[in-house]
Image: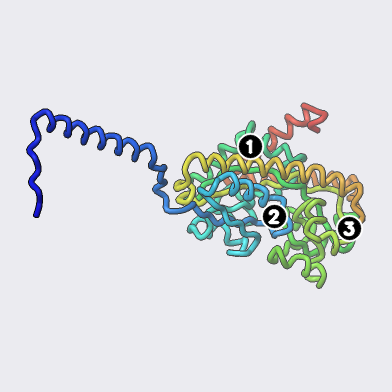
Amino acid sequence: MTTPKTPQSPSEKILASRRKFMMGTAVGSASLLAAPYVNAQSGPIRWRLQTYSGAPLGAHVIKPQIDAFNAAANGEMEIELYYADQLVPTSELFRALQSGTLDAVQSDEATMASPVDISVFGGYFPFATRYSLDVPALFTYYGLKEIWEEAYSEVENVTWLSAGAWDPLHIFTKDPIRSLADMNGKRVFGVPTAGKFLSKYGMIPVTVPWDDVEVALQTGDLDGVAWCGFTEAYEVGWADVCNYALSNSITGAWFGSYFANTASWDKVPPHLQQLFRSTIDQSHYYRNVWYWGGEAKLRVEGEKMELTSLPAEEWAQVLQDANGFWDGVAAESPRAARVVEAFKKYAATMEKAGYPYR
């Protein structure tokens, strides 16, 4: 049997209402203060990035950057790093990036066959640079950044992010090169633009998967490589199977870039985009130091390959031939002509500046 409640007086009703209101407000405030921030995203953003380089080289040219990014992203984003040919063949990097199979790529344009009219300049363009700092200087002060952004703005679903310098280009072979005639018939693994230029002297560019290069040198399917400088040749083991190094460098620094799938990039919040750009800059700095110090040290102290050089008159001929090569590329498109004009202006400025620039 329920005991009937005693009716409340008007003043008691007012007090009860006030207590109920105050208790409700306090509970609501406490809930607001105690409730943690909930990100609408169900989990971390995950990217797949593939580099042009094999694992031994990738340990220097990109892994430190990816490790730094993943640590600093604090669980909000994670990039899975893949090396040459692990997910897709290097020649298919661009298509895989554009389709979204890959979220990002580190490569030069020529190696991954970018469908832009400036792809010939990616990688080793003959004599475009003498030192690694020439690359960022050209992009910052001579208009290459704007040209690259313009070119890739015309390509669907690919965003160009940044270019940096790698090592100089030397030719490493099993048999010595002491004259231009010695280049004739030598089958070399190398980047497309430099290979096209060197074919003028009878060299035969050969494309094989990056991981197969050392075996191809051992079996005689390759006579050498025209792909890198001393630092890489020693780091990846090619110096163990090549006997000679041509001290004349075809160019002073490789042009390499970072690219993102545009749809993937647009899903990344601004603070993580900035973090990725900052770690790219960190990667550029790391490589500049690693290559600059390594090249000099190994030319002087390296004992695995004998240094050779071309006669002065033949080297002068190579330099003259490069001018004709530049003019031929400039005729391919107005934008290519703008790049070549920037190269010429930059080279003239460096010569006039003198030491320590030239």
- Return the residue at label 1: 139
Tell me the colour scheme of the image.
rainbow
Label disc, if present, on residue 244 of the rendered structure: 3
Left or right: 256 in relation to 301:
left
According to the picture, the residue beneath numbered tag 2 turns out to be 58
Instruction: Report the side of 42 relative to 102 (left or right).
Output: left
Task: Measure how far apart labels 3 and 2 are at the Cα level.
Answer: 24 Å
Q: Residue at x 89, y 45 (%)?
A: 313
Depth check, front residue: 93 or 170 = 93
Q: Amino acid at mark 3?
A: Tyr
Which is nearer the eye, 84 or 150?
84
In the picture, the quarter occupied by the C terminus is: top right
The picture places residue 68, in percent across and down from the top left corner, at 63, 46
Question: Which one is closest to the eye, mark 2 or mark 1?
Answer: 2
**In the image, which is nearer the foreground, mark 3 or mark 2?**
2
Residue found at x 57% / y 61%: 92
Q: Residue at x 48, y 49 (%)?
A: 262
